[in-house]
Image: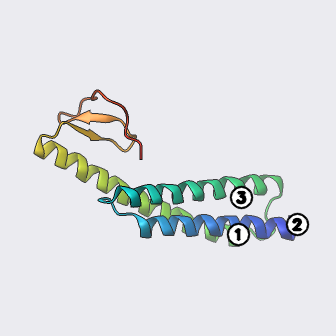
Amino acid sequence: MPAATQVSAKELLMHAVDSVRQALDTWQATDLERVAQAGALLQSAAEHLNTAAVALGRHPADRPAELRALAAALRRDLLRITKVVDACSAFQNGLAVRLGMGVSYLPSGQAQDWRGHAAEGRPYEA
């Protein structure tokens, strides 16, 4: 792969890792503005990752070990933020059940009532 493309794919992966780490630092489950910021950072990471994948599909890496290390770091951070978001969702859903609140939201964005049945209304959008 030409050096410019190698650096580009590496830089894109570095940006993806950085965006996910910023999302982890930004996440605050009780602050919807910060949740939205974290979501935007994750979207940015996904875009960088997709662009890197396209570049690598066209020109395989000369030094794949560097890219594998970045991909492993990205995977670890994505697993971490997934666990954080899932835990917050589970907590919110459990709270809704205990308090008898009308509607809570699943990680998919679908509404459910306190019994766990699909609820009327529109899906949650940040």
Marks 1 and 2 in Cβ contact (< 8 Å): no
Crowding near the residue tagged with mark 3, few <14, some 14–19, many ≥20 C-alpha atoms within 10 Å = many
Front-most of 107 and 65?
107
Residue on which disc 2 sits: 2
Whichever of callouts 3 and 2 sits on the residue coming sooner in the sequence is 2
The residue at the point 52 percent across, 56 percent down is 40
Crowding near the residue tagged with mark 1, few <14, some 14–19, many ≥20 C-alpha atoms within 10 Å = some
The residue at the point 59 percent across, 57 percent down is 44
Q: Quadrant of residue 43?
A: bottom right
As drawn, 85 above or below 126:
below
Q: Secondary structure at mark 2?
A: loop
- Expressed as whole percent of the image width and height from the top left, the position of residue 116 reads 22, 34
Residue 112 shows in the view: yes
Distance from the alpha carbon under mark 1 to that under mark 3: 9 Å
Q: Quadrant of residue 29?
A: bottom left
Residue on which disc 1 sits: 11
Quick one: which residue is furthest to the front in this view?
33
Distance from the alpha carbon under mark 3 to that under mark 2: 14 Å
Distance from the alpha carbon under mark 1 to that under mark 2: 14 Å
As drawn, 123 above or below 94:
above
Residue 76 shows in the view: no
Whichever of callouts 1 and 2 sits on the residue coming sooner in the sequence is 2
Amino acid carrying mark 3 in the image: Ala
Residue on which disc 3 sits: 52
Q: Pick the quarter of the image with the N terminus.
A: bottom right
Image check: 33 left or right of 43? left
Amino acid carrying mark 2 in the image: Pro
Q: Secondary structure at mark 1?
A: helix
